[in-house]
Amino acid sequence: MRLALEDSQVVMIDFQEKLMPAIADHNSILEQAHLLAKVAHTLGVPLWGTEQNPSRLGHNPESWRGLCKETLPKMHFSACDEGLLECLKPPVQAPQGNARSLPKHLQKNTSSKVKDQIVLAGCETHICLLQTAIDLMQEEMEVWVVVDATGSRKSRDKDAALDRLAGAGAELVSLEMLVFEWLGTAEHEHFKTIHQWIK
C-alpha cells in the first residue's frame, strides 16, 4: 500500500513552545515537522493542528500554524475526543434534486470523498499521538506516522509507542518516504523545489 496525494491529510500534534524543549532531539524533530508542513502546503494536502492545553503549554510554531486549516485546542490526549474526526471527514450532504422528479441515478451526489490516509506527526509519541492514532484506526482510517517528525521526552517511550502503533496497523514512514510517494515522479511540477528543501 502506498500513500496517495489525493487521499492524504496531515495532522500536526502538539509541537508547542513550552513542551518541545523537553522532547529528546527536539531541534531535529521540529526541523522535520516544519518541512512536512511546508511540503503538504505546497502540494495542497489539507493540514490540521492540535495544541494540548495551550494556556499552559503555549502554541505550535507560527511558521506552520498559519498553514493549518484549523488548530484544535484540546484537553483530552486523543484529538478525536476534541473534534478532529469532524475536521477530517466532510459532512455528508443529501443528494440534490427532487426525489419524486428524478430517479436516484440522476440525482447529484454532493458528498465529498473522505481523504482517509491520515499522516500524523507530533508529540508526545506515546501519549497524544498514540491515542489519536488508535482512535483514527478504530474509525477505519489509514494512519501513517512520520517517525522522524515525532518525539517523546524519553526515547524508550517513543520506541514503545512506535512498536505498539505498528502492531495495531499503523504505517511507519520517514519524511523522505512520504514526500517521494506523494510526488510519484521526478516530473512533478514541484519536484525540484521540494528536492532542494530535502537536500
Image (spheres, grey):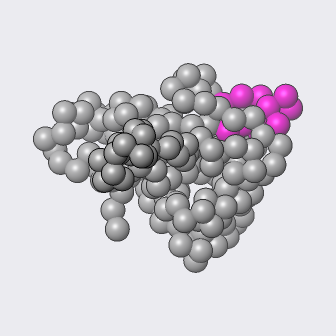
Region rendered in magenta: 50-60
Q: Is residue 36 above or below residue 137?
A: above
Dividing the image into 4 quarters, which one contains the N terminus? bottom left
Q: Quadrant of residue 198?
A: top left
Residue 51: image location, x then y, percent: 72, 37
Q: Residue furthest left?
A: 187
Which residue is depicted at the point 70% across and 43% down? 83
Q: Is residue 4 above or below residue 167?
A: above
- Could you tell me how many numbered marks the image carries? 0
Q: Residue furthest front?
A: 100
Dividing the image into 4 quarters, which one contains the C terminus? top left
Q: Nearer the viewer, residue 135 or 51?
A: 135
Residue 62 shows up from this direction = yes
Q: Quadrant of residue 131?
A: bottom right
Residue 108: image location, x then y, percent: 35, 42
Magenta-span inclusion, residue 108: no
Which residue is depicted at the point 74% across and 57% down? 127
Which residue is depicted at the point 26% across and 45% down? 183
Q: Nearer the viewer, residue 11 or 26?
A: 11
Which residue is depicted at the point 54% across and 29% down? 69
Q: Is residue 42 above or below residue 139?
A: above
**Relative to 26, 117 lies left or right:** left
Q: Nearer the viewer, residue 152 or 116?
A: 116
Q: Residue furthest bottom?
A: 167
Magenta-span inclusion, residue 56: yes
Residue 40: image location, x then y, percent: 41, 37
Residue 45: image location, x then y, percent: 41, 38
**Relative to 75, 36 lies left or right:** left
Residue 30 shows up from this direction = no
